[in-house]
Image (cartoon, rainbow, N blue to C red):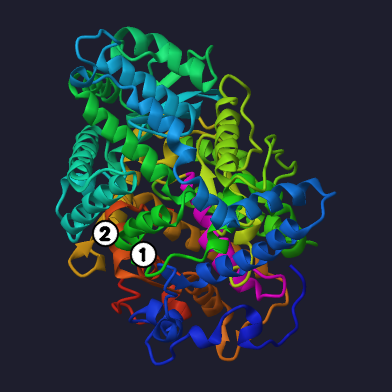
Amino acid sequence: MEKLPPTMSLSQTGIVPTWIDKGADPCQDFFAYACGGFTKDAQIPPDRSSWGAIQLVVKDNEEFLKKVLEDAAASKGGDPVAEKIGGYYAACMDEDGIEKAGTTPIQPYLDEIAKIYDPIKHGSAKPPPVYMSAANAIVTLQAAGYTPFFSLEPQQDFVDATQVIAGLDQAGLGLPDKKYYLDSKGTMPKTRATYQAHMERMFGLLGSTTAKAKAQAANAFRIETALAKLQQDQVYRRDPHNIYHRVELDGLTKKIAPSFPWADYLKTIGIPNVTAISVNDPKYYTAVAAMLKTESGPALRDYLTWTVLRQSANDLGKAWVDESFTMQKELSGVKELPPRWRRCVQRVDADLGELLGQSYVKARFAGDSKSRAVDLTKAVLGAMRVEIEHLPWMDDATRAAAKTKLDKMAYLVGYPETWRKYEFEITRTDYAKNVRAATRWELQRQLGKIGKPVDRFDWQMTPPTVNAYYDPTLNEIALPAGQLQAPFFGATFHPAVNFGSTGGGTIGHEMTHGFDDEGSQFDASGNLRDWWSGSTKKQFAEATKCVVDQYSQYEAVPGVKLDGKLTAGENIADNGGVKLAYEAYKTWREGKSVPRQVEGYSDDQLYYLAYAQSWCEKVTPELLETMAHSNPHSPPMWRVNGVIVNQPGFGAAFSCKAGTPMNPGKTCGVW
C-alpha cells in the first residue's frame, strides 16, 4: 500500500461521512452509529429488495456492463468476444421475438412429459409401466438442465480430494426451503397460499381451464411437499459427514434404487462410464424411486410440467415473466420487475461471465489492484498464523495441523489467469436457443470434470461479482474483482479502512471459513478427516455453542428470530475475520507513517467504522424473514452488532464502558 499524506479528510479515507449518525451512541448500537445516516435517508428502489453498500457497487457494475454489452451488440463484427456477448445480449433484449416464440422453446420437454403412461388414457394397451415412462421423462429433463427430484454435479471426493466424482443431491422444490412446506412460522402459511395460487395461474398460462389448473397445481404441490418431508434440513447438512455417502453406481442399481434406469441416465447426460458416485442420503433415492411407482401418471406429469414451467418462465414471454415475479415479490418484497436490460446483463454474466468480465477487469481492476489485494491477503494470513500459535483452547498436535492447513490455503484474486472459452454458437435472433446452448454447454463442462484431475483454478464466480467464497475441498479462497471496489477497497483509502472492510469483512471472513463448524472438518488437502484432538474438539464445540446461542436471541423481524445453528458458520467467519484483520492492521502499521487521527477519529475507530459501513443496508421485511428461515447469513444489522460485541479492541477504540451493549463483558470467540 502506498505512502499516504500525513493528513487526510474523512471522506478521503474511504469512510462515507454522511452515513454516520453522530446523534447515535456507538457504545449502544454501533450499526445505528455507523449507518444511521444512510438508513434514515435511503430508499429501497422498487425493483430491488435491499439497498446499501453492496447494492451500490452492484448497480455501478451493472451500468458499466450494460454499456459494454450495448457497444458489443452495436459493433460491426471482427471481435469474437464482442460478437458473442453482444449477440447474446441482443437476443435477450429482443422481447418481440421472445413473445412470438411463445412456449415453443419448452414444447419438446412438455411433449416428453406427455408420454408418461396413463392407464385410463391408454386403455388396455401395454406400454412401459408408469414409473418407467416417468423415469424416461426425468432423464430427458435432467439432460436439458432441469432438476426434478434430484441433481447431479461434479464433486471432489470428500475423503480423497484429488478425485472428482459424481455427486447426487436432493432437489425439486420451488420454495426456498423445506420449512416452507412443513412449518407455520411467521408468514409461511401466507407464502404457501401465494405459491399455490401462483402455480394455478402458471398452469392456466399453459392453456389449462381453471378447474384443471387447480388440480394440476394440487398434484405438483403435493409431490413437492412429499419431497420436502424426505429431504435433509440445512442445519443437518452443515455436517459434511451427513451429505457424503459413496455408494457407487452398483449401490444405486442393485440396492438403493434399482428400479430407476441409472445407466441410461448417465449415458443420456453424457457420462456413460462414470461409476464413482456419492449421494447426500441413500434413503432419499429409495423413497423417490418408490414415489415413481406409487404416484399416478397424471400427478407425475403435473409435477414435471411444473418443474419445467418454474425453471423456464423467465426465458419466455411477458406474461410468464410477470407471473414468475409473483414469488419474487412474496419472498423478497421487491415491488417492481427489474428493467429488461438489467435482467439481460445478469443473464450474460451468468452464461458468458468470463467473456464479459474481461472488459470489467481492464476498466475496474487494472494496474496494481491485484498486487494490493494480494498484499492485504498475506497480511491477514499472517495474523491468523499468530492467532493459531496462541489459541488457548487448541492443543499442540491440533495446532500443528491447523498451521499446515493455513500454510496450504490458496487464494484466487481478481480474475482467472486463463479465460474460459465458451464453445457454443450464439444467435442474435433466438434467445431461447442461446439459453439452451449455454445450459447444455455448462452442464457438459461441469460433468466433464468427473474422473479428471482437480482444477484448482476454475472460478466459481465471475470477475464482476460482488461477493467472495471459500471452498473447503480445495482449501482455497476466491476474491473476485467486483468485491475489491470502493467502498470496500481503494488504492488511496486509509489502510485501516481497507483492512476493516476488505481485510476483515471479506478476506478474514473467507479465511475463517476454513476453520468454522463445517470447514474445520476438512484437512489441509481438502479431505474430510478428523484432525482435531478430543479435548480441542470439545472446547471448539463449546465456543461454537456460545455463538449459536448469541445469535439465536436476535430477531430478523418482530417475532421471528435467527436460527443460530443455521447461521453458525457465517457468524464465526464474521467474528473471526474482523478480529484477525484488526490484528493484521496493528502489525502492518508498525514502523509505517499512516495518519493516526482523521477529523477526530483514530485509525482504530476507522477500522471498525469501515467494517460496519460495508454492511450499511436497508432490507425489506419480506426478505429479512426469508433470510431468517433459509439463509445461512445473518441480516446486516446483526452482521455488525453481533460481531462488534465480541471484538477485544472495540471497547477501547470507542471508549465504551464495560457493561454497555457494545462492550458487554461476556463475549463469544472461536477465532
**Local secondary structure at mark 1:** loop
Q: Which mark is residue 635?
A: 1
Residue at 75%, 63% (x, y): give it. 363
x, y percent for residue 241: 35, 30
Magenta stretch in the rendered image: 489-514
| Residue type, label 2 | Leu
| Residue type, label 1 | Pro
Going by the image, does 609 lie left or right of 282? right
Residue at 51%, 34% (x, y): give it. 473
Q: Main secondary structure of the magenta part?
A: helix
Check residue 29 for magenta coloring: no
Name the residue beneath numbered marker 2: 562
x, y percent for residue 413: 67, 51
Q: Vertical placement of 299 versus 116: above or below?
A: below
Q: In this view of the protein, can residue 517 be seen by the observer?
A: no
Look at the numbered discs 1 and 2 and tell me whether their residues touch, using CB distance below 8 Å: yes
Q: Which of the two residues, 314 or 610, is positioned nearer the viewer here? A: 314
Q: Vertical placement of 433 versus 654: above or below?
A: above
